[in-house]
Image (cartoon, grey):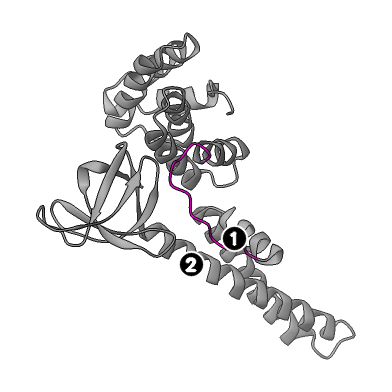
């Protein structure tokens, strides 16, 4: 488990956020001091005050995840590490702590391991944030336009064929990046739930009187398929579906 972060950069982010009327810097320093002293409950209280004032960041969720983990509150730890991962998908500490926290979960799903090439491709695709993908898409598009113009001007010259080949390569990268961007936008539009209580029954329908299909335990994650005022319809990674009460889960 990698330790809590106490970065000055994070402090500067909150110093410039004075419009919220909350002393972000003071709350963060106080929370970090409580964390270093092993007073994790008080550290969590300070970090949560920042969240309630909309002062979210990857570092804040990372620190919260560490504090909850030290209390053996694995559901909240995983929820905050997941939120941090979405904001900074390549951060090695966040990825490590998220993976490490899941080792303590009771529910395990024996899924087939993907082929190495597929695993590498998926890891690469997930390592880029939405903003980075948009930037790369714009970059490849600009190069594609430039390459097309240069080819039309120089196609009769000796370098015309090389320009055409390079333009085809850029076009392929543009299409690939656009596909990743669309996929990431769709993924971020999906909601996921993390069970925060020790265990909960997953019901067959969004009714208190409905039968229990199966039981899941703290930290188990699921995709949210639909929702009512009090219930979420969820799907586990092994394909099982059912309904669970809102108050039993955290959403990211």
Q: Position of residue 224 (x, y in %)?
A: 31, 58
Mark identifier at residue 96: none
Characterize the local packing of mark 2: few (<14), some (14-19) or many (20 or more) Cα atoms within 10 angstroms.
some
The residue located at (29%, 21%) in the rendering is 22
Q: Is residue 178 above or below residue 5?
A: below
Q: Earlier in the sequence, mark 2 or mark 1?
A: 1
> From which residue to which does the magenta span run?
103-114
Element marked by disc 2:
helix
In the rendered view, does 38 fall on the left or right side of 203? Answer: right
The residue located at (15%, 58%) in the rendering is 228
Q: Nearer the viewer, residue 148 or 240?
A: 240
Q: Nearer the viewer, residue 167 or 64?
A: 64
Residue at the extreme bottom: 156
Q: Are marks 2 and 1 in contact (CB under 8 Å)?
A: yes
Q: Position of residue 124 (x, y in %)?
A: 64, 58
Q: Quadrant of the N terminus?
A: top right
Q: Position of residue 112 (x, y in %)?
A: 58, 63
Q: CA distance from mark 2 to mark 1?
A: 9 Å
Element marked by disc 1:
helix
Q: Is residue 51 above or below residue 239?
A: above
Q: Label 1, on which residue?
A: 125
The residue located at (50%, 12%) in the rendering is 36
- Residue 44 sits inside the magenta stretch: no
Q: Position of residue 232 (x, y in %)?
A: 23, 55
- Predominant SS along the magenta part: loop
Q: Label 2, on which residue?
A: 183
Picture quarter containing residue 187?
bottom left
Characterize the local packing of mark 1: few (<14), some (14-19) or many (20 or more) Cα atoms within 10 angstroms.
some
């Amino acid at each position: 488990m990698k330790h809590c972060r106490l970065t000055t950069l994070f402090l500067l982010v909150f110093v410039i956020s004075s419009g919220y009327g909350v002393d972000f810097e003071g709350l963060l320093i106080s929370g970090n001091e409580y964390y270093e002293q092993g007073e994790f409950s008080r550290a969590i209280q300070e970090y949560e005050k920042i969240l309630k004032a909309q002062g979210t960041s990857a570092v804040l969720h990372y620190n919260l995840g560490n504090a909850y983990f030290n209390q053996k509150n694995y559901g909240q730890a995983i929820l905050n590490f997941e939120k941090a991962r979405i904001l900074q998908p390549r951060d090695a500490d966040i990825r490590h702590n998220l993976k490490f926290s899941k080792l303590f979960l009771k529910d395990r799903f024996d899924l087939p391991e993907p082929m190495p090439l597929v695993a590498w491709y998926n890891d690469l695709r997930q390592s880029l944030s939405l903003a980075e993908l948009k930037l790369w898409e714009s970059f490849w598009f600009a190069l594609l336009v430039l390459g097309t113009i240069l080819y039309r001007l120089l196609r009769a010259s000796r370098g015309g064929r090389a320009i055409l080949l390079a333009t085809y390569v850029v076009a392929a990268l543009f299409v690939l990046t656009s596909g990743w961007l669309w996929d990431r936008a769709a993924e971020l539009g999906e909601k996921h739930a993390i069970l925060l209580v020790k265990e909960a029954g997953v019901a067959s329908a969004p009714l208190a009187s409905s039968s229990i299909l199966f039981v899941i335990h703290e930290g188990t994650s699921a995709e949210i398929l639909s929702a009512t005022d009090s219930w979420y319809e969820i799907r586990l990674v092994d394909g099982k579906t059912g309904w669970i009460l809102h108050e039993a889960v955290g959403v990211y």
